[in-house]
Image (spheres, rainbow, N blue to C red):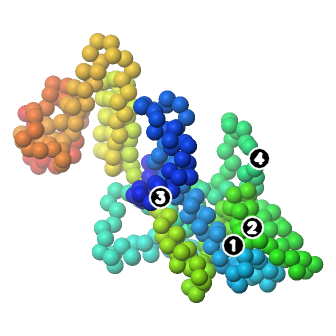
């Protein structure tokens, strides 16, 4: 299970609300999920940050860094410098050390390292899901068409190379043609084209440039003397993120029986591997008979046993008050008596525990 390693920011949430005002307003009117068109706030926030970080880097390269004299247009000399930067990066690929730098910074700052999450991608290495085949964002693709191939979290930055002629497809031979030496290219227009109209070009530009250095993003930023330098650096930090993975299990509990089967899978996994978290989705399909009551009783009994309910001291969860601890119920006793162990970590951690 991959998850986003950055807490929700009030500032960013406000941006999302402003940029998607009508969709957010429509969603807020729904009393329950799936009442109509709506947005998933966590999903939207995550991809908003991913995209904004991508856009900040592309704008930094194409508008603030490439436009050395700050007149808003790229003259022939500026275009040649940009081409030289890209050509050099295509030929010089190094293994990124972003994660090593991250761990070093946390140690220096005396911050605890992740205990159960495995970092898979950091924003310092660019946009993680870069398309590597040409696509035109202005062309509406069919809903059921196959997803275009893209790089994933397992492809390291230095292994990402365009499967097409980047310079020809994205900039064309006219970009630095001698007969167009008097022509100036609008920097913001170039940014808009590569970032949004032809997103594979923007994706691949970052994939080309970033691995030309072992760490950092300084080679994509304007010089410190640039009037927008502080603003760009602040934006890069604001939208920075880490994507990490945890070993998780998801249980779709449609009945007491499916809950028991799902939890048994969790326990089997725990015997040979690790489970950092498990999620139970209560989705009882019927209210006939005592289905809801059985689900509630079974769930309660399983959790009681999981935290050591069959030990002499009955066990309790880390967030449970001592005075609220109850004897494990019958459903819990029946379930845990059928398992290889008589409980979860709470039982296994009780040295010399006697099953009552």
Q: Does the CB distance between marks 4 and 2 fall below 8 Å?
A: no
3 or 1: mark nearer the eye: 3
Which of 214/10 is in front? 10
Quadrant of the image for the C terminus? top left
Q: Does the CB distance between marks 2 and 1 fall below 8 Å?
A: yes
Residue at 18 percent across and 36 percent down: it is: 304
Q: Which mark is residue 124?
A: none
User: Which of marks 4 and 1 precedes in the sequence?
Assistant: 1
User: Which of marks 4 and 3 precedes in the sequence?
Assistant: 3
Q: Which mark is residue 62?
A: 1
Q: CA distance from mark 3 to mark 4?
A: 29 Å
Q: CA distance from mark 2 to mark 3?
A: 26 Å
Q: CA distance from mark 4 to mark 2?
A: 19 Å
Q: CA distance from mark 1 to mark 4?
A: 24 Å
According to the picture, the residue beneath numbered tag 4 turns out to be 139
Q: Is residue 156 left or right of residue 241?
A: right
Q: Secondary structure at mark 3?
A: helix
Q: Position of residue 199 (x, y in %)?
A: 70, 58
Is 43 drawn above or below residue 289 in the view shown?
below
Q: Give the quarter of the image for residue 202.
A: bottom right
Whether residue 142 is visible = yes
Q: Position of residue 3 (x, y in %)?
A: 44, 52
According to the picture, the residue beneath numbered tag 3 turns out to be 12
4 or 2: mark nearer the eye: 2
Residue at 24 percent across and 21 percent down: it is: 293
According to the picture, the residue beneath numbered tag 2 turns out to be 190
Q: CA distance from mark 3 to mark 1?
A: 24 Å
């Amino acid at each position: 299970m991959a998850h986003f390693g950055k807490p929700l920011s009030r500032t960013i949430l406000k941006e999302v609300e402003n940029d998607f005002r009508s969709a957010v307003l429509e969603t807020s009117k729904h009393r329950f999920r799936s009442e109509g068109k709506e947005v998933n706030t966590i999903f939207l926030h995550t991809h908003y940050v991913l995209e904004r970080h991508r856009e900040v880097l592309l704008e930094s390269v194409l508008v603030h860094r490439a436009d050395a004299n700050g007149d808003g247009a790229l003259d022939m000399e500026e275009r040649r410098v940009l081409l030289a930067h890209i050509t050099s990066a295509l030929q010089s690929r190094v293994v990124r050390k972003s994660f090593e730098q991250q761990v070093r910074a946390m140690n220096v700052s005396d911050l605890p390292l992740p205990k159960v999450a495995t970092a898979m991608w950091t924003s310092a290495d660019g946009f993680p899901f870069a398309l590597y085949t040409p696509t035109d964002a202005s062309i509406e693709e069919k809903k059921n068409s196959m997803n275009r191939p893209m790089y994933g979290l397992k492809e390291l930055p230095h292994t990402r190379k365009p499967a097409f002629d980047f310079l020809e497809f994205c900039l064309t031979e006219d970009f630095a043609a001698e007969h167009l030496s008097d022509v100036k290219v609008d920097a913001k227009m170039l940014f808009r084209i590569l970032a949004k109209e032809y997103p594979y070009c923007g994706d691949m530009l970052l994939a080309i440039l970033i691995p030309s250095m072992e760490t950092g993003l300084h080679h994509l930023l304007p010089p410190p003397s640039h009037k927008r330098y502080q603003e760009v650096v602040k934006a890069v930090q604001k939208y920075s993120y880490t994507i990490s993975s945890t070993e998780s299990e998801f249980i779709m509990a449609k009945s007491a029986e499916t809950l028991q089967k799902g939890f048994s899978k969790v326990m089997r996994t725990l015997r040979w591997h690790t489970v950092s978290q498990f999620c139970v989705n209560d989705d009882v399909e019927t209210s006939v008979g005592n289905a809801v009551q059985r689900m509630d009783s079974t769930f309660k009994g399983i959790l009681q046993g999981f935290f050591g309910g069959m030990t002499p001291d009955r066990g309790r969860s880390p967030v449970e008050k001592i005075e609220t601890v109850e004897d494990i119920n019958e459903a819990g006793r029946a379930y845990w008596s059928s398992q290889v162990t008589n409980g979860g970590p709470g039982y296994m951690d009780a040295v010399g525990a006697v099953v009552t």
